[in-house]
Image: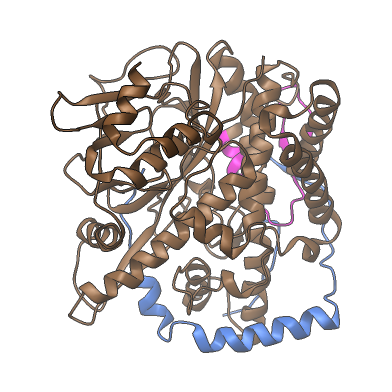
Amino acid sequence: MAERTQKQKPVPTRTEETVTEAPATAPQGEKLKAELDDLLDEIDEVLETNAEDFVKSYVQKGGE
Amino acid sequence: MAIAKVCGIETEYGIQVRGAESNPVSASSVLINAYVSGVLRKVGWDFEDEQPGNDARGFRYEDVFSPEIETQLVNAVLTNGARYYVDHAHPEISTPECVDALEIVRWDRAAEEIVRASMERAKHLLHDGSEIVTYKNNSDGKGNSYGCHENYLVDRATPFGRIVTQITPHFVTRQVFCGAGKVGSEFANTSSQAVPYQISQRADFFEEEVGLETTLKRPIVNTRDEPHCDPQKYRRLHVIVGDANMAEVSTYLKVGTTAIVLAMIEDDVLGTDLTLANPVSAIRQISHDPTLTRTILLREGKRVTALELQWAILERAKKYERSHGLEVVGERVGLDVLTRWETVLTGLESDRDSVASWVDWVAKQRLVDAFAARHDLRPGDAKLKALDLQYHDLRAERCLAKRVGLETLVSEDDVRTAMTQPPTTTRAYFRGRCLQKWPNDIVAANWDSMVFDIGRDPLRRVPMMEPLKGTAEHVAALLDDCDTAGELLARLGS
């Protein structure tokens, strides 16, 4: 199966719209990238270990 | 003429019991009781004047559809003037009445801390090793949504039809700076491949332009007409279209900009040329396009991006400030909101990362994209959904929003005091101070009255029909002077 990295890709839907221009994703500065890397290290530690179960078991009743 | 934008936020929190079987209603009750029994004698809510079936368009819906109020469930009034209760299957806190967006941020943050404190206390009540966990979000990712509602005082003299027409463009597009972000889509037949990430938690759930319902066929403009104050003079616009925000600046801008736009509508300076052709599809399309480049159709036939529409509203707001001032939304806060509004639109347009500390969906997207890149994950991966959920997890040790460097507007001290102290600027002051001073003499309270039982007389109801009466300026000296509730009632009655 073909893998595609898909970030911020404008996707046509059946509803009315136009796409004005393809956005250029700004290259991330080195500093920003380093900060993000630190953050990701931390997140690897605090993220729920079994993501699949965690997500599956989070079921809410509608509210309001 | 525009009137003071007294406002509030009601947030329903997601709730889950980990490590044991439990239903969400009883878990919510345990959570709230854990907090309430620890801090105060519980004063119940008084439903006498609740009329959620009234429709702002001028008819009552009672026979057709009556939103349920579960009077038997936990329902408490707090000394900060807030209401803490079980709504459907969620714990919910309504902030006390506030006068501006900065107060809203402070008491909304206080509400969050109250829920966090409740989780801590509940730990000591649960002996089976289970844990109650809460989330400040609006969706479970499986098609179930719960709300974060705003309320704004508006002049009854303003035609409701004008409000509906003119507030809708703002409600549809303001998500660009106050959307909380969501991994994937819950809209029918929309896959994670088609929409890997979207701006708003709630946009997938709106099906109507205007209506009374809140739990199905949700409308962009909700018509619940329950003013909780003098119904001859006021409306309380009940707004159901927003996301619950972790970012303080998002909450601030959401409420601050909306208050200004409502004042402009009351003063009839906004105009109708920004009216959207298809608001329901537009709100979803904007949410599904984090590039912010797609256009939506105006009724006049022109196409604009969400940002262009926001720029147009901002320009009008700046002009309004010059012609009318911003006293009704709090002059100082209003001016700051205008400045930040411009900064956020500029940032979204030209330097997205510059507003990552202000805007939840931008902060979350950075996280999701970086995490996906590091672990080589594809759209739809459970780990990305877990990341999304955990952004909103209120446990300090798990909460990801606490780790992404969001800017704060209110100090930790001010948040802490707001957990027990009411705003000094509205009738919430009277409510909160009375509850602090005479909890044993108050049998019930609600937004527009309090019921005292001082023993010898029949119960005494003190009406509070004016949201801007009962402030510290009006009653602080009186409350300080009175030793007993009986004395207070005697002096109020004379």
Q: Colour of chain A?
A: blue
Q: Is residue B291 visible?
A: yes
Q: Is residue A55 magenta?
A: no
Residue B130: horizontal and vertical position, in percent?
Answer: 24, 78
Q: Is residue B277 visible?
A: no
Q: Foreground: B380 or B119? A: B119
Could you tell whether B457 is left or right of B170 in the image? left
Q: Is residue B302 magenta?
A: yes
In the rendered view, would you say B75 is above or below B238?
below
Residue B390: horizontal and vertical position, in percent?
Answer: 49, 72
Residue B8: horizontal and vertical position, in percent?
Answer: 50, 39
Colour brown maps to chain: B
Q: Tally the numbered discs.
A: 0
Could you tell whether B225 is left or right of A21 in the image? left
The colour scheme of the drawn protein is by chain
For the C terminus of chain B, the image quarter is top left
Residue found 63% across the figure and 43% down from its top:
B101
In the rendered view, would you say B301 is above or below B376?
above
Could you tell whether B229 is left or right of B98 in the image? left
Q: Foreground: B440 or B223? A: B440
For the N terminus of chain B, the image quarter is top right
Instruction: Specify the segment rendered in magenta.
Output: B280-305
Residue found 49% across the figure and 34% down from its top:
B477
Residue A28: horizontal and vertical position, in percent?
Answer: 82, 76
